[in-house]
Image (cartoon, grey):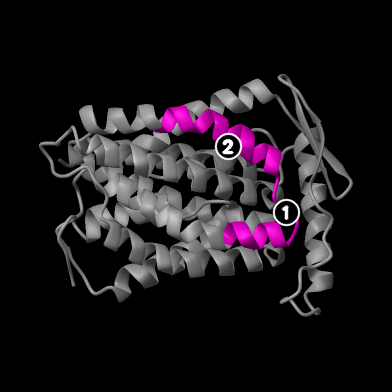
Amino acid sequence: MYFPISGVTVNPLIPLLVSFGVSFFTSMGGVSGAFLLLPFQVSILGFTSPAVSPTNLVYNVVAIPSGIYRYVKEKRMAWTLALITIAGTLPGIFIGALLRIHYISDPGKFKFFMGLVLIYIGLRLILDLIPKKEVGKDKTNHLERKFSEAARKVRIQNDSQPPDFIPIETKELSLMKYVYRFYGETFSVNTICLFSLAAIIGIIGGIYGIGGGAIIAPFLVAIFRLPVYTVAGAALLGTFVTSIAGILFYTLLAQFYQSAYGTIAPDWMLGGIFGIGGFLGIYCGARLQKYMPAKVIKLIICLIILFLAFRYIGDFLRG
């Protein structure tokens, strides 16, 4: 099948199956998988124009709702955490889109940029997997163990019904502090720091075409010591909203800009096919996440990320 906007010729089953496999694992960590699908489109499908970024955002918009639904159904959506990250990420998405068009349109430079972003994410996850005696980390590990035990208890129940999990509860919200409680443990985040981080990640997400979730989810887990079981839903919701904004902005810019490396507007058909596979994969991943140990989730994502990062930087250095 030929996709005229991207110039890609591929059997539709290939992007559908690839997106399903990728999103199944990454959604367990609150990541849609777009950051892995972009290298696949660039290197395997030969989609190297700036339009690959908004096409990736189309994938997010189609794929993510199934995961959001599942996390809401299981009472594991940290709404306040999601709103703070969305508020910071949205302006950054617009800035990142402009930078992508004007300064990072060259596919070679873009590949190097992808490698740097992926290395950063991978290193943060590696540091989080190293055993350390830290109060915040011990508390997070304790919470993850308690939640895993609760998940094991409901495994024998009919999973078509929402399990009787304890919902995430906001205890305090101000300009300086956001506090929430989950399974008897309380977690605190500096609101201004979280907002600022989201703004920076929004810029990177706008350039990379990932909505920002692939960066902010590992950061919340590794730096703020928030449990992955509470971060995943909020990260996916934030990625969904910012991806909509990114698509609108890229589509608007396409009316006024034309890159020397190709079109700017998204390939809706290709992005939609990727999205269908992602829709199914994210739902399955979100549904099974509660049964997967947190360290296993982090390790899977970490290995994939670092493999791709070193590959792309190596390709760039070899010219």
Magenta stretch bounds: 67-93
Q: Using the rendered view, name the quadrant where residue 91 is placed.
A: top left
Q: Please state the horizontal and vertical placement of residue 14, each as a whole percent of the image.
A: 30, 72
Residue found 37% across the figure and 26% down from its top: 95
Q: Left or right: where does residue 256 sit relative to residue 287?
A: left
Q: Answer yes or no: is residue 300 visible.
A: no
Locate the N terminus and report the quarter of the image it occupies: bottom left
Residue found 75% across the figure and 24% down from its top: 177
Q: Which residue is mark 1?
A: 76
Is residue 283 shown above or below 30? Answer: below
Residue found 71% across the figure and 20% down from its top: 175
Q: CA distance from mark 1 to mark 2?
A: 19 Å
- In terms of secondary structure, where does tag 1 sit? loop
Residue 181 or 90: which is nearer the viewer?
90
Q: Left or right: where does residue 202 sit relative to residue 196?
A: left
Q: Which residue is mark 2?
A: 219
Type of the residue with mark 1: Arg
Residue found 64% across the figure and 21% down from its top: 192
Residue 75 in magenta stretch: yes
Is residue 67 shown above or below 77? Answer: below
Q: Answer yes or no: is residue 22 visible.
A: yes
Q: Please state the horizontal and vertical placement of residue 310, each as a whole percent of the image.
A: 35, 45
